[in-house]
Structures are given as structure tokens and as C-alpha cells.
Image (cartoon, grey):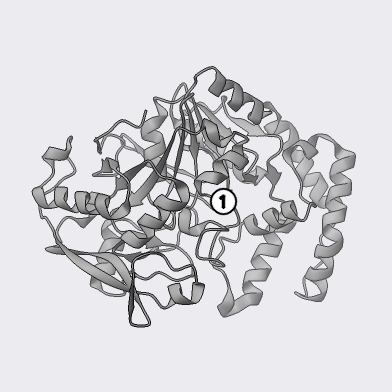
Amino acid sequence: MPALVLLGAQWGDEGKGKATDLLGGSVDYVVRYQGGNNAGHTVVVGDQKYALHLLPSGILSPGCTPVIGNGVVVDPSVLLSELSGLNERGVDTSKLLISGNAHIITPYNVTVDKVTERFLGKRKIGTTGRGIGPTYADKINRVGIRVQDLYDESILQQKVEAALDVKNQILTKLYNRRAIAADQVVEELLGYAEKIKPYVADTVLVLNQALEDDKVVLFEGGQGTLLDIDHGTYPFVTSSNPTAGGACTGAGVGPTKISRVIGILKAYTTRVGAGPFPTELFDEDGEALRRIGGERGVTTGRDRRCGWFDAVIARYATRVNGLTDFFLTKLDVLTGWEQIPVCVAYEIDGKRVEELPYSQTDFHHAKPVYEMLPGWSEDISKAKSFSDLPKNAQAYVKALEEMSGAPISAIGVGPGRDETIEINSFL
């Protein structure tokens, strides 16, 4: 019953797509369990580059069944567009399964997201404007639209009208926008129904039966630990639980079925959107990391904020997720620095703090305490084993492993599928 959770151990964009794709050939199912098309994965296969937003990365692995779980919010237009794009490139998407309990991102959810961010001005959260948060809010408020509702027009009409009763009041009276017609929304949503029907399934049943049959199931988180709605840098977070516990609720499997939890760590740190970021760089080093690392958001197209590796965050991710392993990505980006700073603690109000403060105020004022590690100048992209790495690169990896609290079992030394050093097997 090998079930693995693979998730981001920082603020997202750590390279989860590459890690999932690497494992995809060895697993039977790859499951997205939260988030929506606000989470982007880049996967490089040979000379082909794929940008995935909603679909699980396992869709690129022949023989693997990709699953969109009940905890995901689905924009049907984005889903169909992404499927069409992959089909045009010769990727077989016929095995995709979508939970009938997943919630639908409606046109009014997108509208509310965008106008709210504009209204907040300088206080905005930095959302992607894709309706993710409002859809999760509807889910919690019990006025959400689920995939299964597309197949009962009467229920769909009632639910859309109920949701718009309040939203139209807000749009017209607070934001000075036009009211949204329920009939138009229903018509648009019904237009997607038959197109996605072949993929809709009872994914909870499918996944639990697969685990009972000793199939290998990989649960793939979007975003990262520090963007978790409960355990992240609230309120500058996503609207779901990318942490390991979210895999259980977002896919419908019990915690006793999870065998390993793998955290993806970038060899430095990045963040997209607003919010505190203790190691953020505003100098030439930060610009170099951004340029060499190609740090531009897959989904948003925004430049990522860049900084040095933060071991405090890594330790926190180990703790809240129960991490058993790390996959360290983009080690090659650090080639060329004579010395590489690593944040080992924070200074808050003149005191050294070694663990992530629970107080948002304290974290906002945290200043990084750095330890300098020797760098390397050799090209490491061709390394196939840990011993192939320069001594200083080996020492850097070992130092990060000791500081982070879990073994580093794989290292990314380039963007390609084959540019990975596997130290310990994840399976």
C-alpha cells in the first residue's frame, strides 16, 4: 500500500512538477488534492517544455492515471484548454479522472476575485485573480457548485441563483459593477458538462481500491507549505491546505495509508505575491538568482522574489508535514558564487530565534541570521551521483540536510527530466 505525498516545503515554485514527473514512471496514480489553476508546474521532457496549471504532472507519464481530487477547484474552461493543448502535442489525456465532488470555479467567482483585489489596493493579498479564493469561500459557505451539479440542470439553476443573491448585491452596491445573470452562468456551465463527463468519477473509491490492490499512488500538492491556509504566512496564503494533511481530505484517503511524505526544497528561496520573506534580496545577487533560475511564475507570469536558503522554514515544513525526505532542486543555479549565505536563524527584537515564530508580527520583523558556506564554480549539470558533485557542493547539500531535519534523497542539477541525482529511492 505505497502512498506518497509530494509537496512544496517553501512558498511554492520549488520544482514539484519535475519531482512528480520523475516518479511518474514508477507510480500508477498521480493525484492533485488541492488548489486550482493558480498552481503551475513546469516539466521538461527531452527538448519539450510543458507548463501545467490544473492537471497533475503525471499526465505526461504513459501508464499513469492522473486524478483531480475532491479538494481541487476546477475552472472548466481552463481544464478543457489545457487538455486540448496537450492533445495537440501528442499527449494521451484519456486516463484523466475528475472527482464529481470537486468544486467548480464559476465566472462570478473570477469576477469577485478581481474586483476585490482592486478594491483592496495596497492591502491586496496578491491573488492570481482566477477565482480560487471565492470558490473555496463558496464551498465553506455551502453555496458552491460541484462538478456533479452540472448533470442536474434544476439543481444547478437553484444553486447559481442562491449564490448570486448576495454576490450581486455586493457587486452592484459596493463595487459599482453590473449584476450577473444567473441564466447566463448556468448556460455557460452546462456547455462544459458533456465535454468533461467522460472524465468524471468517484475518485475516492478508485483511489482506495487502488491502494488496497497495492498500486502506487502519489499525491501532488500545489503551492507550498508557507502558503497553507492554516500553517502558512496568513493572510498572504492560498485558500486550501497544500500541507500533507490536505492530501487526506483533498483525496479521500485515511492518514494511515500514507507511507512517505516528500518535501521539495529549492536550493535557495523564492516567493510570488505579497507577504513577509526574511531572506529576500534586493541586490545583484537577487537579480542573478532570478535570471539564472528563470524565476518567473508559470501561472502568473510574474517575476518571483528571490532570496537565500532559509533553514528555519525548512525545519518548520519538516515538522508540520511529518516529512520523511527532501528533494533539493536547482542546485545548479548556485554555481559561481564564492560564498553562499544560508539563513540558520532569525533576529527578532534583538533576540536570536531558531524556529518559525507563530506571531505574524514577529515573522514580519524577522531578520535573517546567516552562516556563510563555501561555493563552487564547476558545472554540475552532468553529475549522475553525489560523488560527482564538487566537494563544496556536497558540503552545501549536507549542511542543508542537517539544518532541515530530514534526509535529502534526490538533487536536481538541471531542468531536464534526467538531470537528477537520486541518493535514496522514494519507492
Left or right: 237, with 204 as reference point = left
Name above or below for residue 300 compared with residue 57. Answer: below
Could you tell me residue 224's position as x and y percent? 46, 53
Which residue in the protein does label 1 denote? 241
Could you tell me residue 365's position as x and y percent? 41, 78
Could you tell me residue 102's position as x and y percent? 68, 41
Q: What residue is rendered at 31% in x and 62% in y?
A: 290
Q: What residue is rendered at 54% in x and 62% in y?
A: 237
Name above or below for residue 88 compared with residue 274. Answer: above
Left or right: 174, with 401 as reference point = right
Residue type (three-letter) at the residue carrying disc 1: Asn
Q: Nearer the viewer, residue 255 or 218?
A: 255
Q: Residues within 10 Å of mark 1 (few under 14, many from 20)?
A: many
Q: What residue is rendered at 58% in x and 77% in y?
A: 123
Left or right: 292, with 146 as reference point = left
The reply to whether residue 240 is visible in this rendering is yes
Q: What residue is rendered at 39% in x and 26% in y?
A: 25
Q: Nearer the viewer, residue 341 or 17?
A: 341
Residue found at the far bottom of this picture: 349
